[in-house]
Image: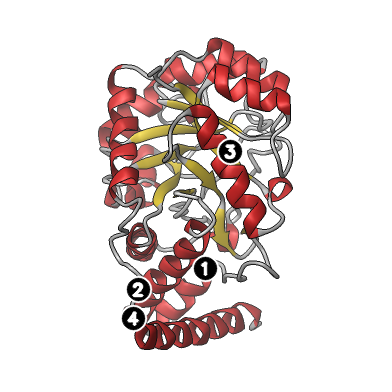
Amino acid sequence: MHTARAFICGCSGPTLTEAERAFFVEARPWGLILFARNIETPEQVRALIADFRRLVGNAQAPVFVDQEGGRVQRLKPPHWQAWPPAFSLAKVYEQDPLKALKAARLLTRALGREIRAVGFNADCLPVLDVPAPGSHEIIGDRAYGRDPLVVALLARAAMQGLMEAGVAPVIKHIPGHGRAKADSHETLPRVDAPLADLEAVDFLPFTALADAPMAMTAHVVYTAVDPDLPATHSAQVIGEIIRGRIGFSGLLMSDDITMKALSGSIAERAEKALRAGCDVILHCSGNLAEMQAVADVTPPLAGAGLKRAQAVECWLHAVADAPFSPLPEEEAAEREAQEIAALKEQLFALMTEA
């Protein structure tokens, strides 16, 4: 069996084209990520994911989605539930920390079960960024609060719930997007905070969850560490901060390399991320010519990156037929569903309060 190449890519629509099928067979990306353009009905999503896995020859190939709740939901009503944003849990935490932690776990477990039911086995969640005053709203209510300790606690509970559903989490955007005053989808943010401040706030949640299986980089410049390059392209940030001070040892993927924060051609962006220390490249647009350019410069997984990818796959295979928290008996399931519905109603109400 050929080793998968060190990239994750998207596709153009709700079904694979013949050109995409040929590409997946030849290029063998490690994973797939789906967006709203790829999602219509549960049956269609199941078929799309199964098709991809057949083509790459891996029944548990990682298939990712950004299903956070709030503004960032790729699977939406009427086929899937609406989920409240993470920040609503911070509001509950202010009044009742234990209730908030339980809610984070229960809701994220339910969310995980819902996406797993159609074939997803990885979610780009939880968001560990800590929004700072004056920062861009690209993070905003996607965060679990503005206190780094609260973010760490709620995100830990959410990560536990997701894994209990048999879905692998991806912590993001390491080492922290919360101070950025620009949206990295549109331009390159620069953070000028001293290293001591970054360690005390931005890095803290990532350090607390450094045992996560996967993390996604931030396309942000931290001038206290590397005045020139964003984390995704900076060997200093990845080596000294992410692998060093934070102590993250799992699989490190780039954020989407098509984002305007990065410079150079798509191939150059991929090469720079790999040289800096990313294990896997993330390319999301579904543009086949760009996907081919990424594949052309991305080698098969090897060395430490291969071991990290294998650790993720080992876990995915282990939970494929027996998630850590199987659905409870019918009566207990009904009680849990009622509790989740009540929690969601409360959280949505909190977010609409002035």
Estimate the x, y position of residue 304 in percent, counting from the top left. 28, 22
Q: Residue at point 62% right, 51% down?
A: 45
Badge 2: residue crowd in 10 Å (few <14, some 14–19, many ≥20): many
Estimate the x, y position of residue 302 in percent, counting from the top left. 34, 17
- Check disc 4 and report the residue beneath it: 329
Label 3 – label 4 distance at C-alpha? 32 Å
* Callout 3: SS: helix
Label 2 – label 3 distance at C-alpha? 37 Å
Q: Which quadrant is the C terminus positioned in? A: bottom right
Is 72 or 350 nearer to us in this picture?
72
- In front: label 1 or label 2: 2
Any mark on residue 87, and which? 1
- In front: label 4 or label 1: 4
Q: Residue at point 41% right, 67% down?
A: 109
- Check disc 2 and report the residue beneath it: 101
Query: Contact, CB < 8 Å: mark 1 with mark 2?
Result: no
Q: Residue 213 sits in which quadrant?
A: top left
Estimate the x, y position of residue 134 in percent, counting from the top left. 61, 55
Residue 263 located left or right of residue 253 = right
Q: Mark 1 or mark 3, which has the lower sequence index?
A: 3
Q: Mark 2 or mark 3, which has the lower sequence index?
A: 3
- Check disc 3 and report the residue beneath it: 51
Q: Mark 4 or mark 1, which has the lower sequence index?
A: 1
Q: Mark 2 or mark 4, which has the lower sequence index?
A: 2
